[in-house]
Amino acid sequence: MSAYAKKTCWLVVSLIFFALGVIGLVFPIIPQIPFLLIAFFCLSKGSPKVHAWIRKRKFYQKYILKFEHKFEEVFENSPKLAWLRHLVHHSHHQPH
């Protein structure tokens, strides 16, 4: 899959989750926060500019960055998660 196709897929998925989040705002039975978080995640994967913008926000730096570092620390040091590290590492490095 080309880089353009991957970027487009991330952006389409982010739009779908954003729409679900907006629907959740209108209908309180549907949770909006998880959908909006997933939408921002997908949007940041599809657009480097949005990713950079999100990383500059104070909320991100104050709360999410701490969680990210803690997660990475646990992820790197856990022998039980060695298989998952292997899987993630090899999914990002595809042969040409």
Image: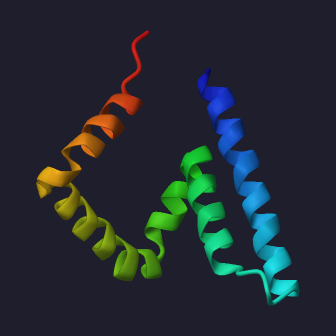
On the image, which quarter does residue 28 sit in? bottom right
Residue 18, placed above or below residue 26: above
Residue 6, placed above or below residue 45: above
Which is nearer the eye, 84 or 2?
84
- Residue displayed at 32% across by 73% down: 67
Name the residue at the front extreme. 80
- Residue displayed at 23% across by 70% down: 70
What is the basis of the colouring in this image? rainbow
Q: How many marks?
A: 0
Name the residue at the bottom extreme. 28
Tell me if 50 is positioned left or right of 9 in this view.
Answer: left
> Residue 86, how many percent across, how many down?
26, 36
Which is nearer the eye, 6 or 85?
85
> Residue 19, how many percent across, how many down?
82, 66
Which is nearer the eye, 22 or 3?
22
- Residue displayed at 19% across by 44% down: 82
- Residue displayed at 66% across by 28% down: 4
Residue 56, placed above or below residue 24: above
Quadrant in the picture for the C terminus:
top left
On the image, which quarter does residue 94 sit in? top left
> Residue 23, how many percent across, how many down?
85, 76
Tell me if 21 is positioned left or right of 92 in this view.
Answer: right
Quadrant in the picture for the N terminus:
top right
On the image, which quarter does residue 68 sit in? bottom left
> Residue 79, how many percent across, how many down?
12, 51
Residue 94, placed above or below residue 10: above
